[in-house]
Image (cartoon, rainbow, N blue to C red):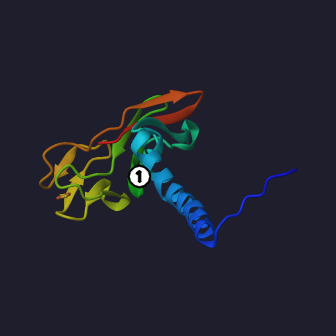
Amino acid sequence: MGRSYKVSRRDFVKLVSGFFGTIMGAGIALPAIGYVLDPALKSGGAREQWIPLGPVDQYQVGVPAPFNFTRTQVNGWERTSSSYGGFVVRESETDFKVLSNICTHLGCRVAWEETENAYVCPCHDAAFTVDGEVISGPPPRPLDEYEFKIEDGNLFIFFKEG
Ligand code: FES
């Protein structure tokens, strides 16, 4: 003979609300636990890495080539995107220089002006030579350079989150 259990209406309501309460609690708690236990895995990429800038053959000698890239950092619920850029300067068949486009005065972005044969900063009228030396204006030093390497005919720059 089987046994039968009777569940009162009050117990049934407690059981059901307890069940749904547990599910909802887990839904809220799990992402928070993930963040607390493993913030490193939630990070949106390495803080240092080699960024590919394509085949070296695409860069002409003496013509600064602009490039840009974006890095997204994920920290818990927060996503922060930052853009970076600069210029690849092929000085000869074998010599390269990769310059940042951040002005060394107060951090505005410089642009290459063909007519002036210079990088020009729009903020305080600074100018830099094609290889980044200060021509005029308030910047205290040349444009910063990215470390780079060439592997299998491709150019890479070393990016380090500052
Ligand atoms: S920020 Fe470039 S000259 Fe001031």
107 on left or right of 146: left
Residue 83 in percent (x, y) is at 39, 55
Position of the C terminus, as image quadrant, is top left
Residue at horizontal 50%, vertical 58%? 25
Residue 154 in percent (x, y) is at 56, 34
Name the quadrant where ligand 1 sits: bottom left
Res. 13 in view: yes
Residue 140 in percent (x, y) is at 12, 46
Which residue appears farthest toward the front when viewing the image? 1
- Regarding mark 1 in the picture, which secondary structure is present there? loop
Residue situated in front as seen by the camera: 91 or 86: 86
Residue at horizontal 38%, vertical 51%? 84
Residue 26 in percent (x, y) is at 52, 55
Label 1 crowd bin: few (<14), some (14–19), many (20+), radius 10 Å: some
Q: Which amino acid lies under the numbered mark 1 shown in the image of this protein?
A: Gly
Please determine whether, in this image, residue 117 is positioned above or below residue 49.
below
Residue at horizontal 45%, vertical 47%? 33
Q: How many marks?
A: 1
Residue at horizontal 64%, vertical 68%? 8
Residue situated in front as seen by the camera: 91 or 148: 148
146 on left or right of 23: left
Please determine whether, in this image, residue 151 is positioned above or below residue 110.
above
Residue situated in front as seen by the camera: 88 or 108: 108
Which residue appears farthest toward the bottom when viewing the image? 9
Label 1 CB sits under 8 Å from any ligand 1 atom = no
Res. 44 in view: no
Q: Which residue is mark 1?
A: 76
Residue situated in front as seen by the camera: 27 or 136: 27
Which residue appears farthest toward the right when viewing the image? 1
